Every structure is written in structure tokens, then in C-alpha cells.
Amino acid sequence: MHEGSSCAILSPRMNQVTENIMAIPKQGKVIAIDGPAGTGKSSTAKRLAELLKFLHIDTGALYRAIAYLSEENAQDPIQVAKSAHLEFRLVPKKNPMNRIFANSKDITSMIRTPEMSMAASRVSAIPEVRASLLGFQRRLGCSGNSILEGRDIGTVIFPDADIKFFLTASIKERAKRRLAELEATGADVPSFKELEKQMRERDQNDMTRSIAPLKKAPDAIELDTSDLTLDEVVQKMEAEVRSRLGI
Ligand code: DC
């Protein structure tokens, strides 16, 4: 990861709708990780990025940031996506180290609530919002060796990724993991049943939207993480990456 003295700012221009994002050339290897919520994308991407010294880009944080700003400022999400300045910064000694800033404000913890999960899923179905983020995500990933996680990385943002993973897990296991994550933050948490219902609704939104729906790329490696520990998933992924990319 590109670490600066106090913090590194990863900030190519966003909000610029690029007609052909495939014209933006990759400067390094790109690993795509897609799948529904709670399958372990963020945790595995973070660990893999540390092991391989790749940049980790959580693209869901961008949709969450737009949803948050839109609600906070009572502004149309399309306008937010066109005008907001989003950036990832490495902030050493903070957890997580890779934090998201909107218009220079650290909003990392504000975007992690169940309400923001649902709101992010809603704004992510708006074609203009997706269009505003296309080039930004591609440029971030093209800046060096990168791991991007999301819903459409292997299908839309990096159909030319060097290796693609598609993570799955049972809904019960996913809701259990998400509940534990939320409880760890000390925030108010919904019941298991409510959380499971929200996840099903979000899966449905993300898989059936007309633009860039969540789906497995034909050449992605599918991994069911239901009965695997985080270490086991990371080990499998690392072995695949090292053997396929020769690193
Ligand atoms: O990964 P996450 O739970 O933080 O993502 C929040 C929402 O953002 C998710 O429900 C759908 C949307 N999303 C998307 O449409 N495309 C991506 N590449 C990443 C996230």
C-alpha cells in the first residue's frame, strides 16, 4: 500500500463521466472481489492487501458516502455524486487505516450503520450515480497493484482484472457475521431477524437493478465461505493469486 508520512491521499479526479473507462490503462495487477454483503469481501480484501502489499479499495464505501451526504444535506444523490469530493486516505494508528473522506471530512464511521447499508443499495441503482463513480474507481485501481471489492468489479469496472473472486455464503451465516460486526461497534443493533430481512432485501435490490447488477463474472473463482474461517478463506485466495500471478 502507498503509505505517506502521516497519511496518503488516493485521489484521482472523480465526477468525470468517462465514456470508455477501458481506455484507462492498468499500471499493475488488479484483483477483483465481488459478492453479496457479509460474505467476507472486506475482511479478506484487507488481509490479502496487507500480505501482497496491494492497495485495498472498498468501492461500497463510495456508494455509502453518497447516500450519507445525500441524507445529511437533503440533496439529490445525483447532484451529490456529481459534486462531492471523495477520497481514501491512509491514516496510520486508526482502525481501519484506510478511511474515507467526503469534502475533507472523515465519514468512515458514519457510513457503517444498517440504515446507510440500505440507503447505499438504493442510490447504487441510480444510473447517473454509478456513471459518476465509474472512472474514479477505474483510475484508483489502475494506479498500481490493487484489490477492489464490490458488486460489479469483475463485470464492469475491471472485466480485465488479473484474477477475479466471487464470494458467497448462506444468508444465516452472513447475517450472523454482520450482527457481530455491528455489535463490536457498540452501536444500536437490529435483531437477527430484522438484519436477515434487510440483507435479503439488499441482495434482491443489488441483483435485480437494471444497471451493473451483482453477478458472478464468467471467469471468476467462486468461493463459498459459509463454513470457512477468515484465515482459511485468505489462505485459499492467497494461494490462487500467487500461483496464477506468479508473485
Ligand atoms: O459492500 P457494501 O455493503 O459496503 O456496499 C453497499 C451498497 O453499495 C451495496 O448494497 C450495493 C452498492 N455497491 C454497488 O452497487 N457496487 C459496488 N461496486 C459496491 C457497492
Image (tube, helix red, strand yellow):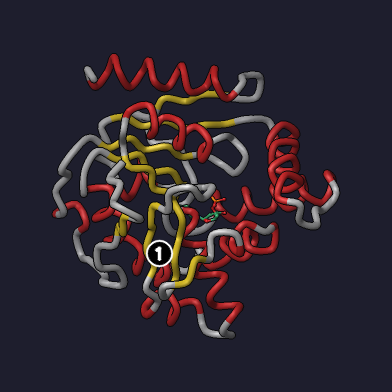
At label 1, counting other C-alpha atoms closer than 10 Å, the crowd grade (few under 14, some 14-19, many 20 or more) is: some
Q: Position of residue 100 (x, y in %)?
A: 45, 60
Q: How many marks?
A: 1
**Residue at position x 32%, y 28% from top?**
52
Q: Residue at x 25, y 31 (%)?
A: 162
Q: Amino acid at mark 1?
A: Arg
Residue 54: x and y in percent read 31, 36
Q: Pick the quarter of the image with the C terminus.
A: top left
Looking at the image, which residue is at 46% across and 39% down? 34
Q: Is residue 177 left or right of residue 57?
A: right
Q: Is residue 77 above or below residue 182?
A: below
- Is 86 on the left-hand or right-hand side of 144? right
Rendering quarter of residue 175:
top right
**Residue 148 x %, y %:** 37, 43
Query: In the image, residue 120 lies at what x, y percent?
Result: 56, 62
Q: Secondary structure at mark 1?
A: helix
**Residue 67 vertical position relative to residue 41 in the rendered view, above or below:** below
Q: Is residue 210 left or right of residue 17?
A: right
- Name of the residue lying farthest toward the bottom: 74
> Does mark 1's beta carbon lie closer than 8 Å to ligand 1?
yes
| Vertical placement of residue 76 versus 52, above or below | below
Residue 118 in which image quadrant: bottom right
The residue that mark 1 highlights is 130
Q: In the rendered view of the protein, which quadrant contains the N terminus?
A: top left
Q: What residue lies at 36% left-to-right and 64% top-to-bottom? A: 133
> Looking at the rendering, which quadrant does residue 158 occupy?
top left
